[in-house]
Image: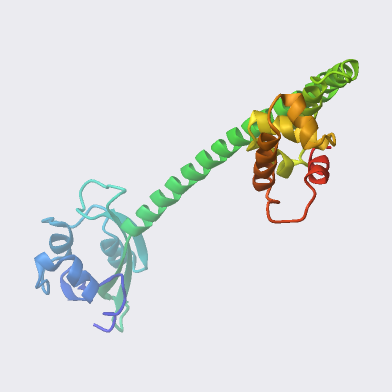
Amino acid sequence: MVLNSVPDGVSLLDSELRIVDLNFTMQKWYKHKMPAQGKKCFWVFHGRKKPCPNCPSLRAIREKKVVTEVVSYDGFNFRKEQAQRIYAFPLFDENREVVGILEYVKNLIPVRELEEEVQFLRKRVALLEHQNELLRNLLEEERRKRSFCEDQVKNFILPNLKELETLIKDLPEARYFSFLSFWFQSLCSSSLPSAYQELSSLTPRELEVAMLIKEGKSSKEIAETLSISRKAVQFHRQNLRRKLGIARSQVNLTTYLRNIMQ
């Protein structure tokens, strides 16, 4: 048959529905019924003893025109998941009498599978859109919470800290309020992330030393304020330079701390 390269099924039948020839695709589909030449198509294709009730080839012979129909593989109960679309083309002699039928059979299983895949993908897209909406709502809620916290810090906490710092400015404890003010500003500001990261690695004692260095205190003054030795202060200075990433540079520690702890 010249249609052996066609991926769909092609059958050549006579006017009595006997099989004259099949292309390779049909031979592959019904290899358990081969050889099929001379046998009735309804027996080979559907295991029936008589023509299918909705046989498009019989209609094409009777109506002398091209007929198409979707039929089940077994020819009995139509099942959507096992269906073929058959195109029946009547073949005429010189007197326009039907002498045969060319059946073109389109396997609909890949189409059904594709439709099912599309439905599955649509459901996945709908699920992702729903999850995306939930995520957007969650992010918006987090943004509102952060905005509320920032407003509380800026409008309530920081002003009170500044006031307390002013009231006890002559006392050693004033430096803690100064540090807390800086820390809260860092938490609420996107312009100081590097300072926040650098200072977050310091120990409480190193933070105390850093605050005093920022104020311009000498090692002797820091030692007296914190009741530690000058050697301990020098040790903390070295650790500060290392943790702040300026250990091998000529950067002045006091200036550096003033820049990041404004």
Quadrant location of residue 159? top right
Residue 190 position within the rendered picture, expressed as x and y whole percent measured from the top left: 76, 40
Does 260 appear above or below 110? above
- Rendered view: 35 above or below 195: below
Which residue is at 79% across, 41% downward?
Answer: 257
Residue at 16 percent across and 72 percent down: it is 19
Identify the residue at horizontal 13%, vertical 55% (top origin): 48
**Left or right: 235 with respect to 64?**
right
Q: Can residue 147 be seen in this view?
A: no
Estimate the x, y position of residue 16 in percent, counting from the top left: 17, 69
Q: Horizontal placement of 248 versus 42: left or right?
A: right
Quadrant showing the N terminus: bottom left
Q: In which quarter of the image is residue 161?
A: top right
Number of numbered labels in the structure image? 0
In which quadrant is the C terminus drawn? top right
Q: Is residue 57 visible?
A: yes
Q: Name the one closer to the observer, 255 or 34.
A: 255
With 162 as the anchor, is 210 left or right in this view? left
Q: Quadrant of residue 249?
A: bottom right
